[in-house]
């Protein structure tokens, strides 16, 4: 166990790599006094640990760092992207509990949204790929009630402010229109909460269907609704720069 500024890795990063939760959530657990290192409860996430440290979260030792894994999932409407929903609604992780190990999502899709959701066992990777600085474009097919004009959609490229929240540039184009509805393709890099819906409402249109078809280099393709497909390790490395994890002495000991 080492103090801040010395050798070792930041404790929240180690917890995230063990697949417990994201790095941000790990910091919250530490601040709540739910993490102990070598028998001592931590009070701050500003703490480094060495490879031999005994780390316990909620009274349970964390497992060894696993190799990074990533899945494409075709989320259906009606599922919440959270591990625990206070309203008791069915979650993405409820639906996948029998098929996958403990995973977290890279970004979210709200209750009524569908399409591509990336899942990983690596909390640090999830956090990095969620950041706008990564530059990954989220692309959606969006059905709205009404017929947006090209001039309205073009205005989104400059960014908008809705209810005091600023949204960065959004690329939107009209694909087709039939009756009182229109289909759009929308692309953005930030992915703030309900960003597409709020942007359309800002223009005066209600979203009746929203399907994410791409997240960065990963595509929904022909993955069926509810389907899940693991991304090969070499593709993860090529697209994310995520290097394979080398087992620490702690993980080697756990396997004996």
Image: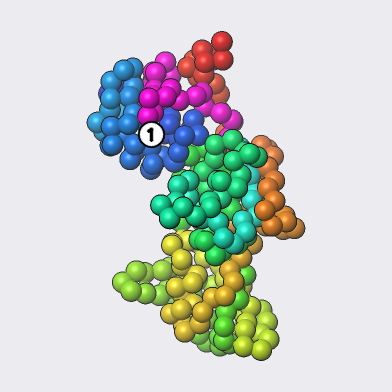
Q: Is residue 54 magenta?
A: yes
Q: Is residue 137 visible?
A: no
| Residue 137 horizontal/vertical position (percent) | 55, 60
Q: Is residue 157 above or below residue 123?
A: below
Which residue is at a point 66% across and 89% down the rendered structure image? 179
Which residue is at a point 56% across and 46% down the rendered structure image? 94
Which residue is the site of mark 1? Answer: 12
Quarter of image, res 103: top right
Q: Quadrant of the N terminus?
A: top left
81 vs 215, left or right, is: left
| Residue 150 horizontal/vertical position (percent) | 56, 85
| Residue 250 horizontal/vertical position (percent) | 47, 17
Q: Is residue 251 above or below residue 212?
A: above
- In depth, the one of 138 and 133 nearer the eye is 138
Of all residues, the one furthest to the right in this rendering is: 222
Label 1, residues with CA under 10 Å away: few <14, some 14-19, many ≥20:
many
Which residue is at a point 69% across and 46% down the rendered structure image? 229
Q: Main secondary structure of the magenta part?
A: loop
| Residue 194 horizontal/vertical position (percent) | 46, 66
Which residue is at a point 42% across and 15% down the rendered structure image? 52
Q: Is residue 240 above or below residue 2?
A: below
- In depth, the one of 86 and 125 nearer the eye is 86
Of all residues, the one furthest to the left in this rendering is: 43
Q: How is the image coloured?
A: rainbow
Q: Is residue 180 visible?
A: yes
Q: Quadrant of the C terminus?
A: top right
Figure disc tally = 1
Residue extent of the magenta highlight: 48-68
Quarter of image, res 38: top left
Q: Is residue 246 magenta?
A: no
Of all residues, the one furthest to the front in this rendering is: 88
- In depth, the one of 117 and 152 nearer the eye is 117
């Amino acid at each position: 166990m080492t103090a801040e500024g010395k050798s070792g890795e930041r404790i929240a990063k180690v917890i995230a790599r063990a697949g417990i939760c994201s790095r941000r959530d790990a910091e919250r657990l530490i601040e709540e006094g739910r993490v102990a290192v070598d028998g001592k409860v931590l009070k701050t996430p500003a703490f480094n640990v060495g490879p031999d440290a005994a780390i316990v979260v909620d009274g349970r030792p964390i497992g060894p760092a696993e190799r990074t894994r990533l899945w494409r999932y075709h989320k259906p409407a009606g599922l919440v992207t959270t591990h625990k929903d206070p309203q008791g609604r069915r979650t993405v992780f409820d639906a996948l509990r029998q098929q996958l190990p403990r995973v977290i999502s890279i970004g979210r899709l709200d209750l009524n949204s569908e399409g591509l959701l990336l899942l990983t066992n690596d909390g640090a990777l999830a956090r990095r790929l969620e950041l706008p600085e990564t530059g990954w474009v989220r692309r959606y097919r969006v059905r709205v009630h009404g017929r947006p004009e090209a001039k309205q959609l073009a205005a989104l490229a400059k960014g908008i402010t809705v209810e005091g929240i600023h949204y960065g540039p959004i690329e939107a184009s009209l694909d087709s229109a039939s009756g009182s509805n229109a289909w759009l393709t929308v692309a953005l890099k930030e992915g703030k909460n309900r960003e597409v819906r709020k942007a359309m409402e800002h223009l005066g249109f209600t979203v009746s269907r929203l399907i994410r078809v791409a997240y960065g280099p990963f595509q929904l393709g022909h993955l069926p609704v509810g389907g899940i497909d693991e991304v090969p390790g070499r593709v993860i490395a090529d697209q994310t720069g995520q290097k394979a994890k080398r087992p620490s002495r702690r993980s080697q000991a756990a396997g004996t």
